Image (spheres, rainbow, N blue to C red):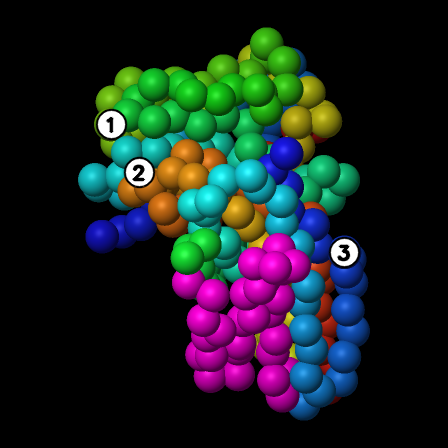
Amino acid sequence: DAGVIQSPRHEVTEMGQEVTLRCKLISGHNSLFWYRQTMMRGLELLIYFNNNVPIDDSGMPEDRFSAKMPNASFSTLKIQPSEPRDSAVYFCASSPRDRVFFGPGTRLTVL
Amino acid sequence: AQKVTQAQTEISVVEKEDVTLDCVYETRDTTYYLFWYKQPPSGELVFLIRRNSFDEQNEISGRYSWNFQKSTSSFNFTITASQVVDSAVYFCALIPSNTGKLIFGQGTTLQVKP
């Protein structure tokens, strides 16, 4: 298995632009997580899905952030409009229940 | 409350020294899982170990060892004879019950100097 796949690996955009981050889960895993890592706040859970259903989105910063899981193997995290304070590394992770496997992360820079 | 605390923000040692990274967790669940992850300068999160709440047996893997004590809600990580390649940020984490929701500590930055 290729593991959790994230794209793009790096994204540089200008304030106000829409950003879409993508994630492909490990086959057979039923939970998906989006985390954000910054120096100030460490690793924060933004949202997690179980069997394609959002279970906990309390970590989503504000309405500019939205996440979808259109099928069992794929998810997107969208930021619209983006702001400089959204600059961070965004990790996607998948889980079969009792362990969590992380993707390589997307480093987002909003200028 | 469900929480993981890594009180040590940064640790600096000289190569070949032993070092212990502390982790204290909080959960009311009787079933839970504890983890350690390593994040090297390259940025990826590398899984090191998983422990379930019913298995307090300590584990050793090469130079790495883990001490799980339910009585003190601690899951400490020791690196013996540290090496420069051990320099990284180390995260302790908790999955309460079977939620699959991984809760991270703040991380401990370990610097091993030659």
Furthest toward the top, the residue is: A63
Whether labels 2 and 1 belong to a single chain: the reply is yes
Query: Chain ID for label 1?
Result: A
Question: Which residue appears at 68% of the width and 43% of the height?
Answer: A42
Q: 10 Å neighbourhood of mark 2: few (<14), some, or many (≥20)?
A: many
Residue that badge 1 annotates = A72
Question: Could you tell me the amino acid type at mark 1?
Answer: Ala
Discs 3, 1 touching: Cβ within 8 Å: no
Residue beneath the point at 66% across and 27% down: A86
Q: Is residue A55 rendered magenta in the image? A: no
* Amino acid type shown at disc 2: Leu
Work out whether residue A97 or residue B25 is closer to the camera in this orientation and state it.
B25
- Return the disc, 2 or 1, that comes first in the chain's sequence: 2
If the image is split into quadrants, where does the C terminus of chain A sit?
A: top right
Badge 2 and badge 3 in a common chain: no
Q: Which residues are magenta?
A: B55-82
Viewer-proximal residue, A65 or A49? A49
Q: Quadrant of residue B42?
A: bottom right
Q: Secondary structure at mark 3?
A: loop
Q: Is residue B111 above or below residue A45?
A: below
SS label for mark 2: loop
Q: Which residue is mark 3?
A: B7
Tag 2 and tag 1, C-beta contact below 8 Å: yes
Q: In the image, are marks 3 and 1 on the same chain?
A: no
Which residue is depicted at the point 48% across and 32% down? A34
Q: Is residue B72 left or right of residue A67?
A: right
